[in-house]
Amino acid sequence: MRLVCPSCLAVNRVARERLADGPVCGKCRARLVSNRPVALDDQTFDRYVGRGDLPVLVDFWADWCPPCRLMAPVLDELASQRSDVCVAKVDTANGQSVAARYGIRSIPTLVLLLRGREIARFSGAVPASQLLDWLERSLAGQPKRDAP
């Protein structure tokens, strides 16, 4: 499968069964599956979400937003516990073009993408258990194919 490095955005090939082993980038040696949300902006968004084979959960947020601040530790925890989903954050001040393209009208809004295609979204702050339930339901039935 293809994984995009959160540090240098290089595409790496990794066997699916090696995800839990903490694979590193062949170019910069950074961890390919980050245990923290990856910060994206207008310049890095498409390269990160469109070229990898893992689902990417994108949090559209702003630092002035109290519900966004409530979601931050929930997303940090999710990123540290799951190697089968990449967690990314787009500060809407630095990702205005991406936010406009995805029609973000309220924050926080979480958008789940698979190979750059949106498969689910919701807006608002929720507890970790509700986020995990939504994520599992959204991922159910999605193909887990490796890159050709």
Image (spheres, rainbow, N blue to C red):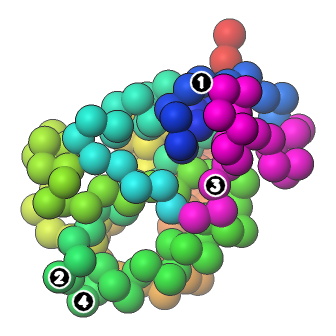
Residue 145 in view of the camera: no
Q: Is residue 69 above or below residue 17?
A: below
Q: What amino acid does circle 3 point to?
A: Ser
Q: Nearer the viewer, residue 50 or 124?
A: 50
- Please tell me how crowded label 1 is: few (under 14), some (14-19), or many (20+) other residues with Cα within 10 Å: many
Q: What amino acid does circle 2 point to?
A: Trp
- Residue 140 tag number: none
Label 1 sits on residue: 11
Q: What amino acid does circle 1 point to?
A: Val
- Residue 34 tag number: 3
Q: Residue at x 63, y 55 (%)?
A: 34
Residue 65 in view of the camera: yes
Q: Secondary structure at mark 3?
A: loop
Label 2 sits on residue: 64
The mark lying in front, picked from 4 and 2, is: 2
- Asked if the residue under mark 4 is in contact with the one under mark 1, i.e. CB atoms within 8 Å, the reply is no
Give residue 139's position: percent from left, percent from top: 58, 50
Which corner quadrant of the image does residue 83 belong to? bottom right
| View extreme (top): residue | 148
Q: Nearer the viewer, residue 49 or 144?
A: 49
